Amino acid sequence: MTTRLDKRFAALKAEGRAGLVTFTMAGDPGHDASLEILKALPKAGADVLELGMPFTDPMADGPPIQASGLRALKGGETLRRTLDLVHAFRATDSDTPLILMGYYNPIYVYGVDAFLNDALAAGVDGLIVVDLPPEEDAELCVPALKAGLNFIRLATPTTDDARLPAVLANTSGFVYYVSVTGITGAATPDFDAVSAAVARIKRHTDLPVAVGFGVKTRDHARAVARGADAVVVGSALVEAVRKSLDKDGAATEKTVPAVTELVRELAEGVRSARPVAAE
């Protein structure tokens, strides 16, 4: 089965460029504002969308994304409302791949079968669930793949050649390489090390490799895009949201433009990188 993600990465390869993957939090800084942002991202240059599922204990996330999730939860965002958000997005965009990213607990509480059915019906293309290791594939990964959703796994600087096959075994869509050790948004990656790591992962898989954690600027995006199939940006975007809010934490007329202007800059950086080397 060819998914939207498969089609998008095939198109990017045909264009000879890397893609831009954007992360925003569902329900931040409010359900309606979050939908506005989501709809604006593809027009600004995002090739793939990651939508965060707010959770009270986001252990892999740094302060910006933690704060983003708390704003969303405070505003009443739930997993059900997040799926409604995807459904509303799909009413005007049937092409852009959209992945839900987060933690297993909300999905477990929702019920795995019910969640997978509702996610597919809403128009979700894939899942990144950061706290489910390969040893727990039977919990969600295998059922998700059987249902027709991509399941994207994370590889890190500490994922050695012995561990990689287990990480890649049931991965589909793309591999997400975490370019720094630690939490999101905490440090700037070593771009030479990132290129070497991507090359190492590609020796084990034909899947595209997207690189994230620590990418904040056009120059960062350009540097990562030279060696990766896609560049993932999250913390910088949720910080752009935060800085645009009023004193009560509500969206303003500056909120959507603050995000889209940064996405345009990042997209320019990605597109100005030299083409990804032929495999």
Image: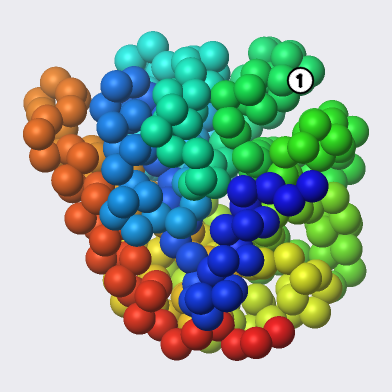
Q: Position of residue 132 (x, y in %)?
A: 75, 38
* Residue at x 67%, y 56% (from the top left corner): 6
* Residue at x 80%, y 70% (from the top left corner): 205
Is residue 258 shown above or below 137?
A: below
Element on which disc 1 rests:
helix
Q: Say left or right for 130 vs 257.
A: right
Is residue 56 shown above or below 38?
A: above
* Residue at x 65%, y 41% (from the top left corner): 126
Q: Position of residue 207 (x, y in %)?
A: 73, 65
Mark 1 surroundings within 10 Å by alpha-carbon count, few (fewer than 14), some (14 through 19), many (20 or more): some
Quadrant location of the C terminus in the rendered image: bottom right
Pick the front one: 135 or 229:
229
Is residue 272 shown above or below 87?
A: below
Q: Position of residue 218 (x, y in %)?
A: 30, 71
**Which quadrant of the view contains residue 27?**
top left
Is residue 41 shown above or below 17?
A: above
* Residue at x 58%, y 31% (from the top left corner): 123
The residue singled out by tag 1 in the image is 112
Q: Position of residue 174 (x, y in %)?
A: 67, 58
Q: How many marks?
A: 1
Q: Amino acid at mark 1?
A: Val
Residue 156 in view: no
**Which quadrant of the view contains residue 147?**
top right
Q: Say left or right for 21 vs 194.
A: left
